[in-house]
Image (cartoon, coloured by chain):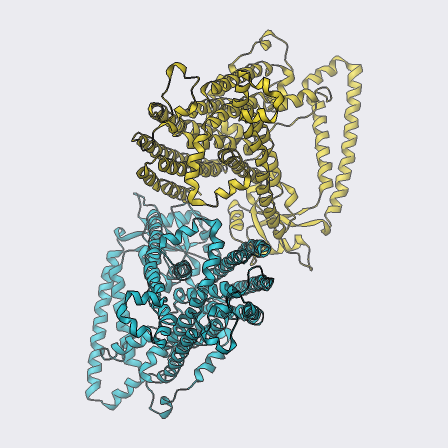
Chain colours: A cyan, B yellow
Amino acid sequence: MIVSALLTSVGINTALCVLFFTLYSLLRKQPGNYEVYMPRLIAAGTSKRRSHFNLERLVPSAGWVAKAWRLSEDEILSLLGLDGVVYMRLITFSLKIFSFAGVISILVLLPVNCSGDALEEIDFANVTGSSLDIFTISNVKDGSNWLWFHFSAVYLVTGFICFMLYKEYKYISARRISYFYSSPPQPHQFTIVVRSIPISSSCSISESVDSFFKDLYPTTYLSHVVVRRTSKIQSLLNEAKKLGQRISQLQSDPSQQNHRHGCFFGLFGRKSNLRDHYEKKLEDIEENVRLKQSEASLAAQETQAAFVSFKSRYAAATAFHLHPAVNPIEWTTEQAPEPDDVYWPFFSESFMRRWISKLVVIVVCIVFSILFLIPVVFVQGLTNLSELEVLFPFLKSILTITVVSQVITGYLPSLILQLFLKMVPPVMEFLSSIQGYISQSNIEKSACNKVLWFTVWNVFFATVFSGSALNQVSIFLEPKAIPQKLAVAVPAQASFFIAYVVTSGWTSTSSELFRIIPLICSLIRKPCIREDDEFEVPSFPYHRDIPRVLLFGLLGITYFFLAPVILPFLLIYLCLAYIIYRNQYINVYAPKYETAGKFWPIVHNSMIFSLVLMHVIAVGIFALKKLSIASTLMVPLPVITLLFNEYCRKRFL
Amino acid sequence: MIVSALLTSVGINTALCVLFFTLYSLLRKQPGNYEVYMPRLIAAGTSKRRSHFNLERLVPSAGWVAKAWRLSEDEILSLLGLDGVVYMRLITFSLKIFSFAGVISILVLLPVNCSGDALEEIDFANVTGSSLDIFTISNVKDGSNWLWFHFSAVYLVTGFICFMLYKEYKYISARRISYFYSSPPQPHQFTIVVRSIPISSSCSISESVDSFFKDLYPTTYLSHVVVRRTSKIQSLLNEAKKLGQRISQLQSDPSQQNHRHGCFFGLFGRKSNLRDHYEKKLEDIEENVRLKQSEASLAAQETQAAFVSFKSRYAAATAFHLHPAVNPIEWTTEQAPEPDDVYWPFFSESFMRRWISKLVVIVVCIVFSILFLIPVVFVQGLTNLSELEVLFPFLKSILTITVVSQVITGYLPSLILQLFLKMVPPVMEFLSSIQGYISQSNIEKSACNKVLWFTVWNVFFATVFSGSALNQVSIFLEPKAIPQKLAVAVPAQASFFIAYVVTSGWTSTSSELFRIIPLICSLIRKPCIREDDEFEVPSFPYHRDIPRVLLFGLLGITYFFLAPVILPFLLIYLCLAYIIYRNQYINVYAPKYETAGKFWPIVHNSMIFSLVLMHVIAVGIFALKKLSIASTLMVPLPVITLLFNEYCRKRFL
């Protein structure tokens, strides 16, 4: 890829970003879009749905940027809980490490790379026409002593990242502890979930739970609730909740109150009838629920799971940590999830079935990853113009136009890939949901891990070792040759990944601000539904956004010494993300449950993986560049990094 | 190796075994050897040291065999605790699985192998002159359908072994639970060890432990003892204990009582003086101990570790399972070991120092394993007669004698290897002891694991892939080629391992009975020491004997379908071990501490490893024999086995 192609891509994406920013600044002021751009504020009641028309509404303004910038961490904590803080700290952490790496690589490594003349002399008159490769390590001659700068940079940046990782982990675990200290006692903290309760023929499950825990914890046991199969009651209750909301809306909505007074004869009569009708319906449902409840209290509806409550949080923690039964796969205990966090379908499953479904999900994940490679490889083929011309000969005339060819090589491939990747988080979330978890936060954490490794595999490794899936897997079956193969393949893809950061990073972040899909949905829905329908405030999709930032972290860490040019683009992406997500925190998302910072270990592990991968590439690169001393001296670094990781694992549980 | 060489080896070893058995039957009756052959009985007081001379003492008898045979499992439990039971069950387990495998392989596989004619037609007239290879799978033609017998045998035996492993694990965990139910409350069950207590400047460690646990467990906390540096007191106490024993011996020994009455004037005077002298000395020591104790109570002698006792076993278990501090590497808790089991040196070490010493030990273990290969490879060279002739030309005339050459090829190599391996268990025990454990049982368990993997690596893999250590390691860096390389190398060493079972197995077991080293030590010591000196009853060296049996298990499992001839020799070994160890349980060993069956997971994991290794070899063999369907159909088997292992790990914690 030549410099001008990259610049075209940068230009297109900058234009897109500016467009999105302007449109957002304009559209967010239109009351019709409040549900899309500030659902959180509407739900909290701080923003009215309707406001009088004024001219200001038509002028885009950047006030929201300043507002987002001023948001303090304690405000984030109160807005989105500890998980929101963790995500924001991931972004600031990445900003810090890549600023440090950026200073070193732009000031030291980039001049070194450019001054090398392994590929071609740099032609300052015609920079745009020259290949991007002259800015990379490929331009340094084999065996050149200038490579020691790269060597030192690797050691220096690794040291800095490890130091920052330690500091960050320490900060987050301190935050986590202070969160637990400051949170008021909540019912779910006094409760454990017991699953795989053995069925005895002589008594019901409820009785056996009662006698079991009364025996074990005579002084601290409080009560228990056996989980019952009540899908019908659940749907009735949901309906009742909806009706209740509607009635309270009818009663309290000030705008409708005004309305009522204005058109006394016409509308009030209808409203009143509507309210009566709703209340009548609600009573019917109440009756129905009672009926079903009395049915459900029969023993036949009991599942082999129960919530067991204790008199103190300490007693609940004890009961959770000390396994109560002789057989470890019976009476399995877990901490009870928060009420909003409970995921019901897998309460009744036995230990064996949960284990088997977990195994099946793992196999499906692997198969999905391998099948997914086919479109990725196809997309990779698109970056190669000549291949495209062979495939679609009728496009030849269009492809020869410079702008088109530059768009195709610089922009299209990553966009298509991006669209394919959009479907991965929901698929992974679905797979995690059938894995046997009983809380949505665990499902999301597991999905986050799955999406992360899927992305690393299918974006990073598939691009680096483009070829068939089997070919790619076979590389990892010969561990001895990995550094060498990585050293050959990774620098070759530098320009693709720079373009990827620009396309995928910049545009996806701005479209997150613009919320294209919810906007379209809202536009489609608007004519069909009444305005006073209830709507849900979305929760932050950690399993989609954390892996994305971590992938860019991986790209930054592995490429900072190979192709320093990637770092400025990455830093711009991170700055965009910093502002945009803070704005979305204020306006859009509301927390649904709280894992209290349990996403951080995923971030930590991913960073350590990136570091070790970078070291392996460095070992290969220095061997390839015929600087075998540097290659050998690089070997202790991954070992030290892994030891550091091991220490962190012990230090921050 | 030809059949006659094997027969020579079998002959020599059978003769040795018979010799050891006869000598043992004779020597064990001599009162002078009671300390060597029945220390346990002497210590228990059931056997007198002296008995009158009679003719029976000179006639070897086999009464002890019958006695050992009749020993029931409950008796073993009372003699050596649950660990003794686990070791004996390991032997009976091996007997069961190899009887099953033996029936299949001798009745089905051996005839199939012999009827194959890939190498040569079997010559029944001259069986002794033919190579052992005609009894192995090498004799079956490539692509022959007869190989499906081997295929079925692998599936059948794997299934049987997994079934037996499950049954056995279930039995042992049931035994373990009943052991805990039946054991009376003991002080160490009410106690936990707390290490890495942070030093505070304002109060002593004792005070901070007290306030910490009083805060956390106000109702259940009982008391604590801070560990102090008291090496001098320990040595004084040891001396006092010795003196006390001697005094009580002087007072109570009935033979000496008789003596005293007999020689009233002569001996009694001296004895009395001796006793007075001892008692005087004991008083001095008591004084000294008090002095040192008052010194040690100063805060300066406190280490950062303490025993904390609770009012109930349940409270102690809770305190152990719930980590008390915010920082996971401070206030680390462990279950207190039994009083006899405590290993003091590492109580005061900080978490970091323990962690680093653990890492260092791991590195040292790896280096030791690699350096150890040099003598093994040299020994391997000895099996090759022609090489020996080149190295030592002056031996040429001796080496040409048939008997000598057969001794050298059949017996010497494994004997030398055996002698080298003798030093491994003590070395590994030493390495484990500096790893930071605070109980001897943990040290022994860790040493057992180390010795096991050392033996598997240095006996099995070093023999199979004879060559330099680096060459051997490099094989494992290309995982794809492993099955093929194993399939070529493993069957080639069949005859060596058959000879190894005969030499190492048979002879080492008989020498265990004969207790050569303690016998020699006792013969040397006898003239120097007084007869009434105290002596120690030895404890069973699990870390030496469990890995040995497991290595033979590995050989049996991997070779049963390659070279079925190995199984009869293995079964003889196991029968010998069965009788001999039961006899040693009765007469020699006394339990020092109780891990309550914690050695079984090591056995289980080792068996699973052997099975998977066997499957990998089978995959390679069938591919090599050009039966690729069988090779492919073999692939699910290791996966199923590993899943079975995973299930067991969850089912039996």
Depth check: give the residue in front, A5 or B574.
Answer: A5
Left or right, residue A374 beside residue B203: left
**A420 or A414: nearer the viewer:** A414
Q: Nearer the viewer, residue A280 or A321?
A: A321
| Side (left or right) of B333 relative to B160 | right
Q: Position of residue B582 (x, y in %)?
A: 51, 24
Q: Residue pushed farthest top?
A: B55
A295 left or right of B430?
left
* Tag count: 0
Residue B159 sits above or below residue A551 on the image: above
Q: Can you tell which quarter of the image residue B487 is in?
A: top left
A467 or B549: which is nearer to us? A467
Q: Position of residue A82 (x, y in %)?
A: 47, 67
Residue B98 seen by the camera:
yes
Q: Quadrant of the C terminus of chain B?
A: top left
Instruction: Reply above or below: B616 against A593.
Output: above
Residue most extreme to the bottom: A55
Residue B577 at x, y percent in the picture? 49, 24
Q: Quadrant of residue B561?
A: top left
Write the residue at 44% across / 50% down.
Answer: A218
Which residue is depicted at the point 39% across and 27% down? B136
